[in-house]
Image (cartoon, grey):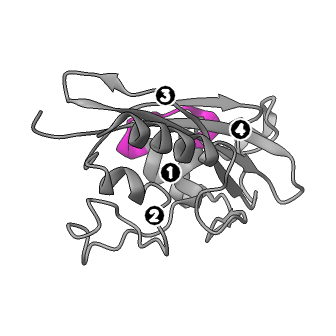
Amino acid sequence: MTETSQDELRERLDALIGQPIGTGGPAKAPDPVNAAMIRHWAYALDDMNPAYLDPEFAASSRYGGLVSPPVMLQSWTMAPPKLVGIHERGGVPVVMKENPLQFLTDAGYTGTVATNSEFELERYPRVGDEITAETVFETISDEKTTAMGKGYFVTWITTYRDQNGEVIGRQRFRTLRFKTGR
């Protein structure tokens, strides 16, 4: 890639910062926060916190009722995966009208690996909450040389809100988009 091309690539990356991912509007959870899904999660992860599972305990706790595990926040608004065609979409489990990072793929950064995820919680999601999520690109690093290859760390932030528009929490999710085989 020429120096000019690197500059153009950097300009396109910088233009994404603060831009929404997806439709630009909030993604609405298909179901309200509910005891059945909390129970499945708690049993699957062997997290028997009575604030998640015991209505009597939860009602007398500081929460005033059953709450969802904090790390379950993302799962409430996840789109159902579409497995048909996942290989052709580069492993992406949802169909997107337009991939905002397609120009990175076109420039040879075809590898993607998730590197980390961080949650900030304002409050626990409560049974009955109707959650929405809005995601924007937060940061994109300069090109880095890693063990996987040369690439860019792309971080987006998702803000989760309840039915009243109050922030429940945020999630930062970072991936490395890299050139494979180098």
Height in image: 158 above or below 81? Answer: above
Residue positioned most to the left: 181
Disc on the earlier residue, 1 or 3: 1
Disc on the earlier residue, 4 or 2: 2
Whether residue 72 is visible here, answered yes or no, is no
Amino acid at dot 4: Gly
Disc on the earlier residue, 4 or 3: 3
Front tag of 4 and 2? 2
Disc on the earlier residue, 2 or 3: 2
Q: How many marks?
A: 4
Name the residue: 35% across, 23% down.
Answer: 144
Q: Which mark is residue 163?
A: none
Q: Nearer the viewer, residue 114 or 161?
A: 114
Other residues around mark 2 within 10 Å, as few (<14) / some (14–19) / many (≥20): few
Q: Cα distance, mark 1 to mark 4?
A: 21 Å
Other residues around mark 1 within 10 Å, as few (<14) / some (14–19) / many (≥20): some
Which residue position holds label 3?
A: 141
Which residue position holds label 4?
A: 169
Q: Cα distance, mark 1 to mark 3?
A: 39 Å
Front tag of 4 and 3? 3
Asked if labels 2 and 1 touch by Cβ distance under 8 angstroms, the answer is no
Q: What stretch is highlighted in magenta?
A: 43-52
Quarter where residue 58 is shown: top right
Which residue position holds label 2?
A: 99
Q: Residue 39 carries which label?
A: 1
